[in-house]
Amino acid sequence: MSHTPFILAAYLISAVVLFWAAIAPIVNKRSLLRQLKNRQARMDKSQ
Amino acid sequence: MNPIFLFFHKTGSPPWFYKYSGKLIPWLWAIFLVLTAYGLYLGLVVAPADYQQGESVRIMYLHVPTAWMSMMIYGLMAIMGFIALVWRIRIMEVLVISSAPVGAAFTMIALITGSLWGRPTWGTYWVWDARLTSELVLLFLYFGVIALYNAFDEPRKAARAASLMSIVGAINLPIIYFSVEWWNTLHQGSSMGSSGTGIHPSMLLPLLLMATATKFYYGANLLSRARLTLLKQDHRKRWVQDVLSKESH
Amino acid sequence: MSRQATGTAFVALLRRDFLLAYRRRAELLQPLVFLLVVVTLFPLGVGPSPTLLANIAPGVIWIAALLATVLSLDSLFRSDFEDGTLEQMVLSGQSLALIALARTVAHWLVAGLPIVLLSPLLAMWMNLPDEGLLILIESLAIGTPVLSLIGAIGGALTVSLKRGGQLLSLLVFPLYVPLLILATSAVSSAVVDLPYTGQLGLMVAGLIASLTLAPFATAAALKLSLS
């Protein structure tokens, strides 16, 4: 049995999981800042 | 004033922490990438295949470091959790809860790579050997901490509960590990990975490089998540408004 | 606080817990019925082959004991939390660890001890050989208090949560793994005439460790939940 598909799968899955775990906080932070800015803008407008 | 005390006092301040961790993070990522690139090059290209296991031993460069990290992070969570509970230091609470998902991710990778390593080498995707079984239980411990945190409405209370759970889990972790190992020898299950045999230096170096690289990954990801948590918790505070005006261009 | 006052408080708490338990005895029977039902499901699920049942008997009985205990743990502190009694206990100035211990002891007497007493019935259903029965009872007698002690920590952590029960099981099951391994190994070894005193010894050590440490963790968790 060739070992290559297993090695590839292992590295691929690890890369995907680690990448996703790494960018999740960055993406969430951007959307959080956007949300807060929108809320700020709405509050400033209503005043 | 004592500079060390001052440093720790400052890190307790969210805006200070936010600002300086922001500067540190790119460096941590950079070091991680360099170490990983070099480690993978040595591991995948330069190092030889194993005499007994063949090429599949290359999965070890992923499996072992991530397994080490999964345990190290849980231990750190317990230590930080202890500090958070005893001295009520908020930044520690944030670091505890930010570590949990990273630890869980490493645990999952350790399990998946362990499984993929096992199939070509020993013929089966899963075996209840000491290490995989302990990793699985560790994954459940992580899930428990994360679930406990998410179940509370109030973030600081949630973080304190998670800290207590981490401490309890960490105390039990060695007991769990040794009992599973002992259980495994009883049932003479096949053991994954050649433990105890001396490792050739050409394999040791990439392994250590990857192990060090994962620590930098943890550092970068941890700070990144901690910053997000602080923003979320303090969103009404002045310093967040300042960040808002500075960062969103 | 004088030694005498602490002792009286402990006894008073136990008395109260028994009275409350007696008033809710129907509710307390549920986990025990659950225990019986779960064990019954196994022969129905895997077939009544005597040798198969005998082989899996220690594990099945112990797992059923774990499940039943977790069911009964959820309500350990809940009613006192909901009506404010727990807060009063925390404010009373009595050692919270002692209060936690009293509650845990009461829990074991009411939920754990019945499991020990029911075990011969379960052993019969699972076709456990006679050599294993005494060790099974011993393992449960030593182990169920540990289940109550460690479970109390989980119960205290989740008492203020709305859906605490499910989370409770997720939290305590990994902690129960060593106990499960040791207990089932002891019983299986006894059945084939292999030494089992090591396992029992380790379980006793675990019991002593939990007895001294768990109440403090439970107390900390109670304070946390009430804060």
Image (cartoon, grey):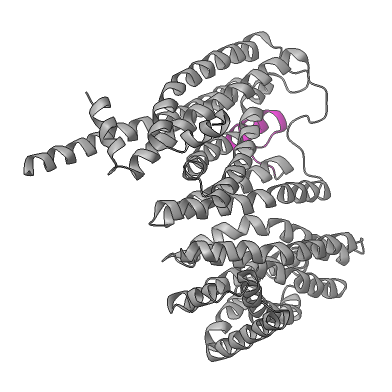
Q: Is residue B184 above or below residue C2?
A: above
* Residue B83 in sight from this viewpoint: yes
Q: Residue A27: x percent and y percent?
A: 33, 31
Question: Which residue is the extreme one toward the front?
Answer: B1
Residue at x-position 76% and y-position 51%: B179
Which is more toward the observer, B23 or C48?
Answer: B23
What is the residue that sits farthest to the top in this orientation? B46
Residue A18 covered by magenta stretch = no
* Left or right: B154 in relation to B168: left
Q: Position of residue B7 (x, y in %)?
A: 52, 31
Q: Is residue C48 above or below residue B249?
A: below
Q: Give the dominant element type of the magenta stretch: helix, strand or loop.
A: helix
Q: Position of residue C187 (x, y in %)?
A: 82, 66
The answer to which image quadrant residue C142 occupies is bottom right
Quadrant housing the C terminus of chain B? top left
- Total labels: the figure holds 0
User: What span is colored magenta in the figure?
Assistant: B111-127
B209 or C225: which is nearer to us?
C225
Q: Please tell me in which quadrant of the rendered image residue C197 appears.
A: bottom right
Quadrant location of the N terminus of chain B?
top right
Residue at image position (61%, 83%) is C13
* Residue B46 in picture, x, y percent from top left: 66, 8
